[in-house]
Image: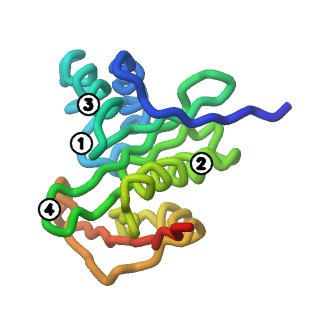
Amino acid sequence: MSSSLTVRRITADQGAILRDLRAASLRDAPDAFDETLEEALSESEETFDAAAHRHADSDHSASFILYTEGHPAGLVGAYFEESAEHKAFVCALWVAPAVRHLRGGELLVNTASQWLAERGAHEIYAWVADANRNAMRFYGALGFGPTGEHQPIARAPQEWQSLLVRHVKHP
């Protein structure tokens, strides 16, 4: 029996789903994100509701949810940096372990990248922890390559992350 995967942009009323997915991602990979499980769980319901509302309606940032058989099973963010370069990023990718073999991560990153490209992005960037070899291989397989830019990870300054880039092919 195969699972059917779909990706949809978050809707304004999905704050609770956003919170549940964030908590699940931090339980699964406590060192992979810019916050701890405790920090995420201490956030108010209103914080997640506001984030869902913002990511549902913005032209600068969005969240996309992966569904398997109608159940939320993954998440990715997409945003434009508010700097002079106005770089486009995918971030905070997470897919439930039970469905990783179904290529949901690829579907999430490609959907987020398409959304960014439709808004004018020519390059999509992603910060990836140097120690996360699986993520490095995953992004490499999707056409992301090194930019040569590295920086310490904010919550773990002894660890480093690399900026990867994928060029967008516009028709």
Q: Secondary structure at mark 1?
A: loop
Which quadrant is home to the C terminus? bottom right
Q: Tell me if mark 2 has few (under 14), some (14-19) or many (20+) residues whose alpha carbon lies within 10 angstroms of its own.
A: some
CA–CA distance in space, label 4 to label 1: 23 Å
Residue at the extreme bottom: 148
Q: Secondary structure at mark 2?
A: helix
Q: Nearer the viewer, mark 2 or mark 1?
A: 2
Q: Position of residue 4 (x, y in %)?
A: 73, 33
Vertical arrangement, residue 102 with respect to residue 139, above or below: above
CA–CA distance in space, label 2 to label 1: 24 Å
Q: Relative to the observer, which residue lies in front, 24 or 118? A: 118
How is the structure coloured here? rainbow
In the rendered structure, are the residues bearing label 2 and label 3 in contact, judged by CB atoms less than 8 Å apart? no
Q: Tell me if mark 1 has few (under 14), some (14-19) or many (20+) residues whose alpha carbon lies within 10 angstroms of its own.
A: some
Which quadrant is home to the N terminus? top right
Vertical arrangement, residue 150 with respect to residue 51, above or below: below
Query: Amino acid under label 1?
Result: Glu
Q: Tell me if mark 3 has few (under 14), some (14-19) or many (20+) residues whose alpha carbon lies within 10 angstroms of its own.
A: some
Residue 128 appears in view: no
CA–CA distance in space, label 2 to label 4: 28 Å
Disc 2: which residue:
107
Q: Secondary structure at mark 3?
A: helix
Disc 3: which residue:
54
Q: Position of residue 121 (x, y in %)?
A: 37, 62
CA–CA distance in space, label 4 to label 3: 19 Å
Specify which label sits upstream in the sequence, 3 or 1: 1
Disc 1: which residue:
35
